[in-house]
Image (spheres, grey):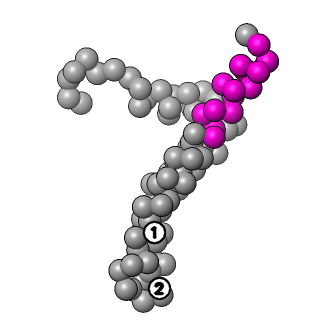
């Protein structure tokens, strides 16, 4: 395997995970249109950002521990043979 292919395979999942976290964060911006007070807006924003925090924590753990990252990312691509889980 060429060095450039290894580099792409090393960085692509990390970059995609960062982009996914940014994508999830965009959905938290609807809090600002609700007309809450300052502290209620901060609380609602933190609550809406919980999925983003989970993705970022998984990214940080997976950055150092590759086996966790592979397990975490492969769990989304497992076939279920058309059965409901």
Q: Does residue 4 lie above or below 28 as drawn?
A: above
Quadrant of image for the N terminus: top right
Which label sits on residue 29?
1
In percent of width and height, residue 4 lies at: 76, 21
Residue 66 lies in what quarter of the image? top right
Regarding residue 44, the answer to whether it shows in the image is no
Magenta residues span: 2-15
Residue 32 lies in what quarter of the image? bottom left
Q: Nearer the viewer, residue 23 or 67?
A: 23
Q: List the residue tagged with mark 2.
A: 39
Q: Does residue 33 lie above or below 69 as drawn?
A: below
Q: SS for tag 1?
A: helix
Q: Residue furthest top?
A: 1
Q: Looking at the image, which residue is at 38% across and 86% down?
A: 36
Q: Looking at the image, which residue is at 50% across and 33% down?
A: 72
Q: SS for tag 2?
A: helix
């Amino acid at each position: 395997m060429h060095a450039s292919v290894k580099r792409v395979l090393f960085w692509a999942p990390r970059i995609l995970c960062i982009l996914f976290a940014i994508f999830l964060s965009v959905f938290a911006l609807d809090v600002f249109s609700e007309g809450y007070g300052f502290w209620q807006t901060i609380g609602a924003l933190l609550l809406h950002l919980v999925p983003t925090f989970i993705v970022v924590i998984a990214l940080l753990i997976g950055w150092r521990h590759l086996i966790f990252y592979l397990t975490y990312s492969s769990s989304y691509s497992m076939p279920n043979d058309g059965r409901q889980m």
